[in-house]
């Protein structure tokens, strides 16, 4: 018999900055709705550079209301990137994550 570990539900504040959220969950939604795994994340001032596991380089700006934050918060993702190879446990953990307005970690 194998034990299946129950995934605990995580709560984060709704209006957290993009940098804090990406640093925590290590996932990036592309504009086509594909979810990528983040290999490295380097902040330089108001901008940051993301390198995904499929070796795509993305320059982003910090925001609380950007497209990427809204897509992560509302889970508007259509597929996962096959090249990135995001583990099943990470996808389950992401799917069990909730964003509440007055409850959860602030990710400072």
Image (cartoon, rainbow, N blue to C red):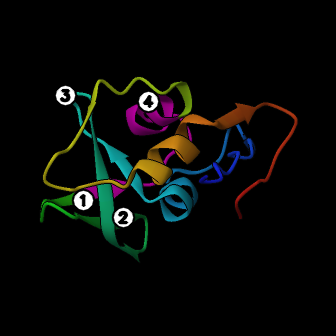
Residue beneath disc 2: 47
Q: Nearer the viewer, mark 2 or mark 4?
A: 4
Residue 89 in the image: above or below residue 80: below
Secondary structure, mark 2, is strand
Q: Residues within 10 Å of mark 2 (few under 14, many from 20)?
A: few
What is the magenta range?
A: 59-72
Distance (Cα) linking label 2 and label 3: 22 Å
- Mark 2 and mark 4 in contact? Answer it, CB < 8 Å: no
Q: Earlier in the sequence, mark 1 or mark 2?
A: 2
Asked whether the beta carbons under mark 1 and mark 2 sit within 8 Å of each other, the answer is: yes
Q: CA distance from mark 1 to mark 3?
A: 17 Å
Q: Closest to the observer: 102 or 84?
A: 84
**Residue that numbered label 3 is attached to:** 32
Q: Quadrant of residue 29?
A: top left
Q: Nearer the viewer, residue 108 or 1?
A: 1
Gap between marks 1 and 2 measured at Cα? 7 Å
Q: How many marks?
A: 4
In the picture, measured across the screen, residue 63 lies left or right of residue 35, that is right
Name the residue beneath numbered marker 4: 71
The residue drawn where x is 87% and y is 34% is 102
User: Residue 10 lies in what quarter of the image?
Assistant: top right
Is 97 magenta? The answer is no
Q: Residue at x 63, y 48 (%)?
A: 4
Which of the two discs, 2 and 3, labels the residue nearer the N terminus? 3
Q: Which mark is residue 59?
A: 1
Element type at marker 4? helix
């Amino acid at each position: 018999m194998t034990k299946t570990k129950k995934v605990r539900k995580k709560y984060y504040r709704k209006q957290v900055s993009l940098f804090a959220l990406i640093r925590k969950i290590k996932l990036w939604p592309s504009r086509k709705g594909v979810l990528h795994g983040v290999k490295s994340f380097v902040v330089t001032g108001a901008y940051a550079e993301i390198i995904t596991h499929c070796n795509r380089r993305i320059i982003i700006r910090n925001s609380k209301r950007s497209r990427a934050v809204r897509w992560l918060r509302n889970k508007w993702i259509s597929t996962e990137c096959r090249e990135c190879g995001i583990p099943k446990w990470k996808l389950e953990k992401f799917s069990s994550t909730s964003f509440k307005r007055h409850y959860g970690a602030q990710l400072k």
